[in-house]
Image (spheres, rainbow, N blue to C red):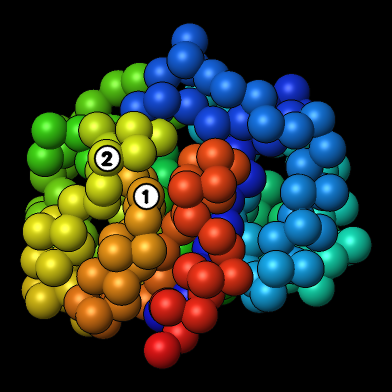
Amino acid sequence: MHIFPAIDLVQGQAVRLFKGDYAQMTVYSDDPVSVAHGFEAAGARYLHMVDLEGARDGGTPNFDIVAAAARETGLQVEIGGGIRSEDVISRYLEAGVFRVILGTAAVLDRPFLQRMVRRYGARIAVGVDVKDGCVAIKGWRETSPDTLTGFCAELQGMGVDTVICTDISRDGAMRGTNREMYQALSRDYSMRIVASGGVSTLSDVRALRDLGLYGAVLGKALYTGAIDLKEAIKEAEQ
């Protein structure tokens, strides 16, 4: 299993939200690229970045920081948040990002998602953010009619390679990950599943690894010191 340390971006800073609430935001660094270098020094090979302003409002206000992380580190950077056009996808890919994550656009514009998957293949991932069993959009402020299971079935039918699935109720809450949800996803779909939200202990990492998941995103637990990144990578790769 791969470990994806996370950097969420607001106004050029590395931040974390509590359960997706922009009013409950903690700033951890005003130099996200330095944070990325620290992750790389700890042995990380991947970096999960989210432009929270882009996710909420559209656009790419933190594009230059993402590009710098891709350019200045050896990490394979994936980025989500505000990616709603092919122009933005191509800009990120040309900047050195290895995978872009479609969220709101994937839910609201299925034909667009299908075209991008056909054109870019595995370089397109889909972020499936779950709130009360349904898929949330627009920076988690709205809930779509799509259920987790129904939407994932559609994604698999389209040939989507990778899904990053977040249980919003666990995100930033430091109370463990939703192992039952990821067990069901791993069992029911052949896509590569990345767990996100609430990965709080090495026990969570081991449990997700044993479920056969492709990856796990680590956020707040790294910033608070609850999980040591080197140890997490070691456990994930066993």
Residue 91 higher or lower than 170, as above or below: below
First of labels 1, 2 by sequence position = 2
Residue 209 higher or lower than 199, as above or below: below
Mark 1–mark 2 Cα distance, whole angstroms, equals 7 Å
Q: What is the crowding at mark 1: few (fewer than 14 residues within 10 Å), some, or many (at least 20)?
A: many
Q: Position of residue 58 (x, y in %)?
A: 58, 28
Look at the numbered disc 2 and give the secondary structure of its residue. loop
Q: Position of residue 177 (x, y in %)?
A: 26, 51
Q: Position of residue 88 (x, y in %)?
A: 68, 48
Residue 119: image quadrant is bottom right
> Marks 1 and 2: CB-CB under 8 Å?
yes
Work out whether residue 78 or residue 86 is closer to the camera in this orientation and state it.
Answer: 78
Q: Tell me the kind of residue under disc 1.
A: Ser
Q: Is residue 90 left or right of residue 70?
A: left
Label ID, residue 175: 2
Q: What residue do we see at 11% from left, 40% from top?
A: 133
Residue 119 higher or lower than 217, as above or below: below
Q: Is residue 120 left or right of residue 209?
A: right
Q: What residue do we see at 55% from left, 60% from top?
A: 228
Look at the numbered disc 1 and give the secondary structure of its residue. loop
